[in-house]
């Protein structure tokens, strides 16, 4: 299922003439294109679908939607388990470091 998910803009930059944002979806941060909402600012909430911010959303509505999505398990379905992903990445980094030490 593909959802339009609210997220908080935590950073904005210009990439090759395209305004891009780092958007936090309750702990999962993704790059998002701001072409449809070019005047969005850091700290604001936007609704994102397939990597594009479609419109602004007030904080209360965004938090209510995120809470509901989390209760229904839709955020994990959309983004995966962020904690499990972080743990797997940390384990892979630790293994790579151990292998590098064995080579020395």
Image (cartoon, rainbow, N blue to C red):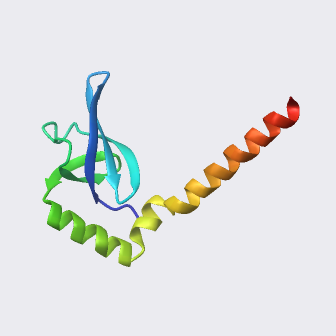
Residue at the right extreme, as displayed: 103
- On the picture, is 29 further left or further right than 34? right
Name above or below for residue 73 compared with residue 28.
below
- The quarter of the picture where residue 35 lies is top left
Q: Position of residue 41 (x, y in %)?
A: 16, 41
Q: Residue at x 22, y 71 (%)?
A: 64
- The quarter of the picture where residue 42 lies is top left
| Nearer to me, 61 or 43 | 43
Q: Position of residue 21 (x, y in %)?
A: 29, 39
Q: Position of residue 89 (x, y in %)?
A: 62, 50
Q: Position of residue 78 (x, y in %)?
A: 43, 62
| Nearer to me, 47 or 95 | 95
Residue at the top extreme, as displayed: 16
Q: Residue at x 33, y 52 (%)?
A: 24
- On the picture, is 26 further left or further right than 83? left
Name above or below for residue 40 compared with residue 5.
above
Q: Residue at x 38, y 61 (%)?
A: 2
């Amino acid at each position: 299922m593909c959802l339009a998910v609210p997220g908080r803009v935590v950073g904005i930059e210009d990439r090759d003439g395209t305004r891009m944002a780092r958007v936090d979806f309750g702990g999962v941060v993704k790059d998002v294109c701001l072409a449809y909402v070019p005047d969005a600012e850091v700290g604001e909430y936007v609704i994102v679908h397939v990597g594009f911010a479609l419109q602004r959303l007030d904080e209360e509505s965004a938090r209510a939607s995120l809470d509901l999505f989390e209760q229904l398990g839709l955020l994990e379905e959309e983004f995966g388990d962020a904690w499990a992903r972080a743990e797997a990445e940390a384990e892979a980094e630790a293994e790579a470091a151990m292998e590098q030490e064995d080579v020395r």
